[in-house]
Amino acid sequence: MKKIFEKAAHAVLFASSTVSIITVLLIILFLFREGLGLFGQKPIEDGQVLLVNKSNPVNNLTSDELKNIFDQEYTNWKTVGGSNDSILLFRIDDIFNYYTEDELAGVDTNMQLLNEKVSELVGKQTGMVAFIPEKQLVLNDKVKTIEVEPVTVSGFFGGELWFPTSQPSAQFGILPLLLGTLWVSLLAILIALPFGLATAVYMAEIARPSVRNMLKPVVELLSGIPSVVYGFFGLIVIVPLVQQLFNLPVGETGLAGSIVLAIMALPTIITVAEDSIRNTPRSMKEASLALGATHWQTIYRVIIPYASSGITAAVILGIGRAIGETMAVLMVTGNAAIIPHTILQPMRTIPATIAAELGEAAKGGMHYKALFALGCILFLITLLVNITVEFISGGKRIKR
Amino acid sequence: MKTKNISEFIAFNIFRLLSLIIVLVLVAILSFIVVRGAKVINWEFLTAMPKEGMTQGGIFPAIVGTICLVGGSMLFAFPLGVLSGIYLNEYMRASWFKRFMKLMTNNLAGVPSIVFGLFGMSLFVNTLGFGDSILAGSLTLGLLSLPVIIRTTEEALKSIDNTYREGSYALGATKLQTIRRVVLPMAYPNIITGFILSVGRVSGETAPILFTVAAYFLPKLPSGIFDQVMALPYHLYVITTSGTDVEASRGMAYGTALVLIMMVLILNITATIVRKKLNKKLKVN
C-alpha cells in the first residue's frame, strides 16, 4: 500500500514537472515559429500585385525602392536600374483620370471590364506602375508583374524605417526601435547606478539594523508597484517636469522614460548588489580592519572588489529589467519610431512597439510576424543577460 | 589619520544621502497617488459601474475582473509550480538536463511580460481558440508566475538542511513521508510568501492581458470563463492614455492607481507577517 502511494506521488510530481518543461519549450517554439515566419516573405500587402509595361527592364524591387517610388521620392526608372522613363503611379481610383465615364460604362457591374482597361492602360504607358489586387489581374502581352524582394535578416536588423502598415510595401527595419531601447535603458541604468550601489553599500555595511529594516520594505515596495502605476506617475509628474526643464514642445521623451525606468530598475540593482556585498567573508573584513584600515577603506579596497562580480551581475540584471519593461515606457516615451539623435526626443522601444501595435496587426500577417520577431529578440536578450549573470557569478555561488 | 576620517565621513554621508533620496522617491510616488486618490475613493467608486465614458461612476467590473484573473492564474500556476519545484529539488538527480531546466526557468522568470502576452495570444487565443477570455488571460498570467513559483519552491526546499531528511530516513520513513511530514512543513512559510508575492505581481501586470483578455469598456460582470473582463491595471492604462476624455477621467485614474497600490501594499505586508509568524511557530515547535 505504502509503495503504491510512493509510486503515485512520484508519478504526479513527474507529470507536473513535465508539464512545466513542456510549457517552457512551447513558449520558445511558438515565439520563434511565428517570428521566423517573417523572413523570406514579400513585404507587399497580401493579394496585391504590381503591374508594369513589358518594355520596362525592371523585374524586381526592394521594399525600400518601392516605398520611395510610391512616395514620389524616385521619379525616374533610371534610379532603380530601369530605362530613362519617368515613373507614373497608378492606383485603381486613378482610372477615371485616363478614361471618360462613357468609356468606363458598365465597369461598376463588370469587374472583368475594369481589369482589362487597367491592363490596356499599363500596356500603353511605358513608365506606369499599377498597384492592384491580384484577383483583378488580367495579363495581356504588353504587361508583366514586378516581384518585391523578400524581407531579409540584414534588412530587418539594419533597416532604418519602421512602417509596418505602409502601402504598398511595409517597411520592417528595427534599427530605430533597437536604438531607442538601448538609449532609454542605458541612460536609465546610468541614472540608477549611483543611487542603487550607494544604497546597497549603505544597507549592507553602514546602516544600523533598525535603519536597514526600514530600508528593506522600501525597496520591496518599489519593486512591487505595478509598472502601469509608474507609467501613470511618470506621465503626470515626470513628463511635464522634463518638458518645462528643457523647454521642449512635448515632454514625452527618451529622458522621461529613462527616469521612470531608473526608479523601476533600482530594486533589482539594490537587492542583487546588497546580497553580494553581504556575502563577503567576515574574515576578509576583519583582516582589513585589523591592519588598521578604516571602515571606509575596508569597504572600497576589500569589500567592493570582492563583490565586484555580484555588482556587475546587478547592473546586467538591471539593464535586462529596463530593456523588457513595457507599460511604463509605452506611456512616457512618446513612441516615435525614428532613429534618435538626442535623448530629448520621443523614442520607441521594442516592448512598447509590441504592446502598441499587436492589437491592430492582422493575425498571421506580416506585421503580426514582425512583432513576434521583436518578441524573439527580447527573449534572446533575456537569455543573454541570464547566461552572462550565470557566468559571472557562477564561481561565487558555490561558496555560499 | 585625519584625512582618512574626513574621507570616511564624506563617503558615508553621500551614501546616506543617496539612500535617503530613494526613500523620498517612494514617499513622493505614494503620497502623490494616495493624497489625490483618497479624494475619489468611496463606497460608490468601488462598487459602481463606470459611467459617462469612464469619467464618472466606479471601477467595480475592473476589480471583479482582476480578482477572476488572479484566482484563475493561481489555480493553475500554484499547484503546478509547487509540485514541479518539489520534483526538481527532491527527486531529480543532477544532470545536464536539470541544469538546462534551471537555466530555462531562470530565464523565463526574467523574460519581459509582453513576451508572455505574445505567447498567450498565439497559443491560447488563436491556436487553441479560446478567444479573448478569462481562461486565456488566466493561463497567460499563470505561465508568467510559474517560473517564479518553481524557483521559490526550489529555494525554500534547498534551504532545509539535509540532516533533517537523513534523520527522517533513519527513522524508517519513506521518501514521500519525509517530504510530507518533514520537508514541506519547514519550507511552508517561504512557499506561502512566494505565493502571496506572485499574487501581487499578477494583479498589477498589464502587458500579458492586453491581447488575451482585457476589455476596454465592459459594464457588466463576467458570467463564464470564456467572457472578456476589464482589469484594474489595464483600466488605469486606458483612462490615462486613450480614454474618451483623458482630463475628465483623471480623478478615476488616481482612484484606480490607489486601489492598485493598496492591493500591492496589503499583499506585501501580509507576506512579511506570514513569513515572520510561521517561521516563529516552526522554531517554537
Image (spheres, rainbow, N blue to C red):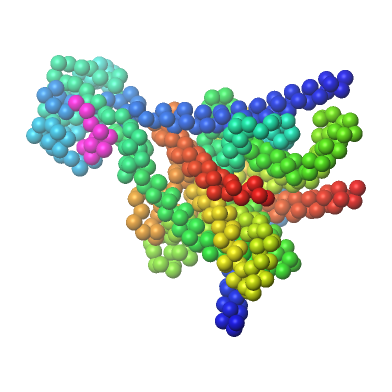
Instruction: Work out whether residue A126 or residue B157 is closer to the camera in this orientation and state it.
Output: B157
Q: Residue at x 65, y 37 (%)?
A: B146
User: Can residue A283 be seen by looking at this rendering?
Assistant: yes
**Outermost left residue:** A84
* The quadrant where residue A136 appears: top left
**Which quadrant is the N terminus of chain B positioned in?**
bottom right
Residue in the picture at 63% in, 31% down: B95
Answer with left or right where residue B138 lies relative to residue A170. Answer: right
Q: Which residues are magenta?
A: A59-70
Q: Is residue A62 magenta?
A: yes
Magenta stretch, main secondary structure, is helix
Name the residue at the bottom extreme.
B2
Indicate whether B252 appears above or below A381.
below
Res. B99 image quadrant? top right
x and y, in percent, of residue A103 in the image? 16, 22
- Left or right of A151 on screen, residue A251: right
Residue B181 x %, y %: 86, 36
Q: Is residue B214 visible?
A: no
Q: Nearer the viewer, residue A208 or B30?
A: A208
Q: Which one is nearer the viewer's eye here, A158 or A367?
A: A158
At x 65%, y 27%, the residue is A19
- Nearer-the-camera pick, A235 or B238: A235
**How many labels were placed on the picture?**
0
Instruction: Answer whether residue B280 is magenta in the image.
Output: no
Residue at screen point 82% across, 37% down: B165
| Quarter occupied by residue A217 | bottom right
Residue B19 x, y percent position in the rendering: 61, 67
